[in-house]
Amino acid sequence: MNAQVAPARRRGLADEVADRIRDAIFDGGYAPGSQLREVELAGALGVSRGPVREALLKLAREGLVRGEWHRGTTVTALSDGDVAELDSLRAALEQLAVALVVEHAPDLSEIDAVVGRMERAADAHEMVRCDLAFHDAVYAAAGHRRLREAWEAIRSQVHLFLLTRIGLESEGYLAGIPAEHRELAEALRAGDRDAALELFAVHRRRASEVLRGSEH
């Protein structure tokens, strides 16, 4: 007997709605902790509440929003515990990515291109997007599909982390981040695994220290 499957559902609209809401969060339209109301979003996007509800569930799976019965859906505000977990997981993934890039010495032109875009970024939100794109390029260069998928699973939360950082301190971020990433790219090209790993660790530590400094 043939297996019975449920009819396919078109999810294109919900995916588009998710993209719009995600972009609005990443552009600073909805700060961490902001409420996301289905009715208002549906009206603004010109869709029914169904696709909005599906979109919010998708964003919740990414860790970008949280739904609570007494508060509804809000943009995720990272707690100290969230930041610590995210930082430690990112470190583990990035150490493997950097080691693989140094070992295989692939074409690093995309990494260089992202640094070039960083140096022309017009504002902090564009810089954050370039920051994420740099790390996307590192994971792509590592040539490890499952590692890249693991990075993509936490990418939206890392974006939130960086948005939280620029909310606390943006001037230094804009001034120093392009040079930091140029140094990281040069370390990958030089092929010194230990030096590259140390520079990437320092890079992550600088970002974490901004958030930890806000607690005092």
Image: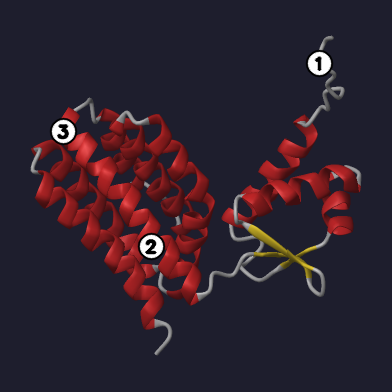
Q: Secondary structure at mark 1?
A: loop
- Secondary structure of the residue carrying numbered label 2: helix
Please state which amino acid type lies under the numbered disc 2: Asp
- The answer to whether 187 appears left or right of 148 in the picture is left
Image quadrant assignment for residue 174: bottom left
Kindly check if marks 3 and 2 are in contact, taking CB atoms under 8 A apart as contact: no
For image coordinates 23% across by 54% down, the residue present is 200
What's the mark number on residue 173?
A: none
Q: CA distance from mark 1 to mark 3?
A: 46 Å
Q: Give the distance between the C-alpha atoms of the residues marked 1 and 2, in whole angstroms.
A: 44 Å
- 9 or 17: nearer the viewer: 9
Q: CA distance from mark 3 to mark 2?
A: 24 Å
**Do the residues under discs 1 and 3 have CB atoms within 8 angstroms?**
no
Instruction: Indicate which disc, 3 or 2, sits on the residue closer to the N terminus.
Output: 2
Secondary element at image label 3:
helix
Q: Amino acid at mark 3?
A: Glu
Direction bottom: furthest residue: 216
* Quarter of image, res 29: bottom right
Q: Which mark is residue 87?
A: 2
Say which quadrant the C terminus sits in.
Answer: bottom left
Residue 3 marker = 1
- From the top left corner, tell me how far across and down residue 51 is, in percent: 83, 42
The residue carrying mark 3 is 103
Residue occupying the point 66% across, 59% down: 65
Task: Give x and y (percent) for residue 198.
Answer: 16, 57
